[in-house]
Image (tube, coloured by chain):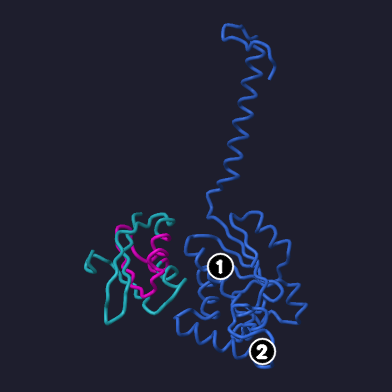
Chain colours: A blue, B cyan
Amino acid sequence: MSADTPASPDDDLSPEAVADLQDRIDALETEVSDLRTEVDDGGPQKMVIIATKGTLDMAYPPLILASTAAAFGYDVTVFHTFWGLEILHEENSKDLQLSSVGNPNMPVPNAIAALPGMDRMTTRMMRNKIEDNDVASVEELIETSLASGVDLQACQMTIDLLGYDEDDFYDGVTTGVGAASAFQDMVDADIQLLV
Amino acid sequence: MSTETAAETLDVKGQNCPMPVIKTKEAFDGIAAGEVLEVVATDSGSMSDIAGWAESTEGAELVDQEEATEGGQDVYKHYVRKTE
């Protein structure tokens, strides 16, 4: 802004200047209205979760959040990549393991936790706790998520990398998707999470 | 609020987070505008979960929540009205 005295309302503007200003106002109004439409497209809000972990404990957060967000009316996509793919693998998902090593919350020191069979034991303990506390199984949460319209996606590159077949996954799981489609979904989403 | 005024009762006793909210949403979709859904849960977290869900959900109004002891266990009752 210049230091000049601002034009007083008494100053006469040429008709051309008024017309120019009117055009500018019209153009800006159109732009604002376009932006509004873009920001509020009237559709449901979206959440995208990238699930990368395949241990029993890490299978829960994405599935619980996904099914809950769907109950809140969100469009939800969970893109499962690397070990996150195990969650969608029908057979493997029922046998997800909990690592007893490297988890300071475990009641056993790492030196003992590393012994053969320890992962099996801690996994069994965790499964019993899950059952005793009426927490849903991974399988139930997958079925619930799919029934609520959550799009569970299996990264095609990881399917090939781990040598899986499309039939290995739960019915309703989306295959044949890659990073680009996940990224596009994230661009449009209101919430993006990496788990 | 008494059960007589609820159009439908959803029993989610013995189910833990996130199931009470998800089942509530399913049952809520099935009632008509003006009707009240009663949800009976044993998950203490359902008190804040269902209140939060109702607050964020268009057309859902939390009418009442109450705690009771039935058959020696704590139960949490929620009443949600469909406003539109």
Numbered mark located on residue A150 in the image: 1
Asked if marks 1 and 2 fall on the same chain, the answer is yes
Image: A183 above or below A169: above
Give the tally of numbered discs. 2
Q: Position of residue A181 (x, y in %)?
A: 70, 62
Q: Position of residue B41 (x, y in %)?
A: 36, 73
* Membership of B51 in magenta stretch: yes
The foreground one among B24 and A166 is B24
- Indicate left or right for A180 with A132 as reference: right
Q: Position of residue A17 (x, y in %)?
A: 66, 14
Q: Nearer the viewer, mark 1 or mark 2?
A: 2
Q: Chain of mark 1?
A: A
- Give the residue at x 59% y 57%: A191
Q: Which quarter of the figure has residue A7? A: top right
Cα distance between the residues tagged 1 and 2: 40 Å
- Give the residue at x 55% y 81%: A139
Image: A70 above or below A53: above
* Membership of B62 in magenta stretch: no
Q: Which quarter of the figure has residue B13? A: bottom left
Image: B66 above or below B60: below
- Indicate left or right for A159 with B38 as reference: right
Q: Which residue is under mark 2?
A: A112
